[in-house]
Image (spheres, rainbow, N blue to C red):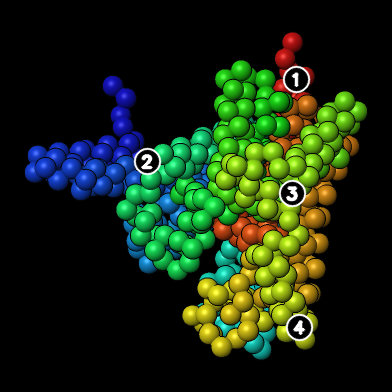
Amino acid sequence: MRKLTLLQWIGSSIILIGMILMTILFIKQELVLGLLVGMIPIALLILLIAVNQPFIALLLLFVENYFIMGIQRYIPVSGIGVLTDALFVLVLFSTLLRAVSNRDIEWKTAVNGASILLFVWFVYCLLELANPTAITAAWVSSFRSLTLYPLLTVVFTCLFFRQFKDLKLVVVLWSIFTVVAIGKMQFQKTVGFDQAEHQWLLQGDNMKTHLLASGTRYFSFFTDAGNFGSNMGCAAVVFSIIGFYTKQKGLKILFVVTALAGLYGLFVSGTRGALAVPFAGLVLLTFMSKKTSIMVGLVVVLISTFIFFNYTSIGQSNQYIRRMRSAFDKNEPSLVVRLDNQKRLAQYINQRPFGEGIGLSGVDAKRYDAERLTTNIPNDSWYVKVWVETGIVGLLLYLGIQFAILGRGIWLVLYRLKDRQLKGYLSALLCGMFGMMVSSYGNAIWGQYPTCILMAMSQAFIFLSPVYDKELASIKTIKP
């Protein structure tokens, strides 16, 4: 009989203890508490495995990143975002432990164009601490999503997702999570908001921005309807392209269904700015398509869609089409207000080339200084946030980095990569990422959950694609 390892003994003991406690609580009719207690040993077991396997720890971070905001509504613990910090620490600890014990961590694989450029941005944001108008507490609150999370995500992804099957696993998980998000949104639409969601709507301006006279905007378990709609638009772009290039019938069906569900979620979210995601994604796909028939087809789709929304009143009785159509109205009141706000900010920030200080923009920053102009005007845009907080110098540096990474990916698809399926996957990620970049002008989504880590992983996959291409080429060579 094979002897159990120490890890197996510990894992078995944890599960046994959990089952005993859960049984006792069930007998006492404490069903909910019993389920929660039963989950603790399972979570501890997963944690134990993750400590020994950095790959699992990184996947755990990916899963948590997608659901954390939904969890926060049901577990109203202050600062639950620290869980993400803890998981990044777990991945780092697991990596260092693996490096010491197995000595098989190839650190040089994490050094590439994306990690170098994001490290430059990291250093710039670090130096923003010396900004005379900066506040350390505000800097700490915004620094992570602005630069630390993307940099660490790219580094860890390049270290542990080095096979094409790893990219496929992430894509499949992303697809499943999207379907789950759509399911939650549909539950909100047909059954209604639950108690936790009602409580969330009562906070701040959430009710004012989601329960409109024109109809309800649904948000699933995302931070808000804007973030949800943009992510669903991104999913529609990514999975429609990947579905076209996927060979396995089961996966093809999953991706096509996900793409259609994502498009549906975009419209039901009532987020006008999210329309930019599929529009921009299709524009980039048209540019990267070398086949004339595909380019013509995509141009026809783009022009037809634009004409439908901008020059017709077809479907105007439908609340979702009506709201989406308003995105093409240059005199739309909220757009006018946003542009006026940007003019007011410009007069102030133009005298500060390095910005006001990280974390000191938008009304959420009032808790640090309620008297500043920058904390009394909403951002309404990720790039306005970067511009206000880091100045014109920071904005130009940031945009340069983002477009350099995007440009590298486009060049790889057009001139370097050979494998057709890999080119399809990378094209999908590039189009989705470009769509989110454009949408981030109208909604400050780039640094939010789950967008921040999703986009950082996509950037890492751009620079990993030549590695995947060689791997796939060698597999084809080996096969008879």
How far apart marks 1 and 4 lie (CA) works out to 60 Å
- Give amino acid for label 3: Phe
What kind of element bears circle 2?
Answer: loop
Q: Residue at x 62, y 27 (%)?
A: 256
- Give amino acid for label 4: Gln
Q: Residue at x 89, y 37 (%)?
A: 415
Can you tell which of label 3 and label 2 is closer to the viewer? Answer: 2
Residue 419 rendering spot, x and y as whole percentages: 78, 27
* Above or below, 168 relative to 151: above
What kind of element bears circle 1?
Answer: helix
Q: Which mark is residue 191?
A: 2
Which of pointers 4 and 2 lies earlier in the amino acid sequence? 2
Which of pointers 4 and 3 lies earlier in the amino acid sequence? 4
Can I make out residue 418 in this image? Answer: yes
Category of crowding for the residue at label 2, using alpha-carbon neighbours closer than 10 angstroms: few (below 14), some (14–19), many (at least 20): few
Category of crowding for the residue at label 4, using alpha-carbon neighbours closer than 10 angstroms: few (below 14), some (14–19), many (at least 20): few
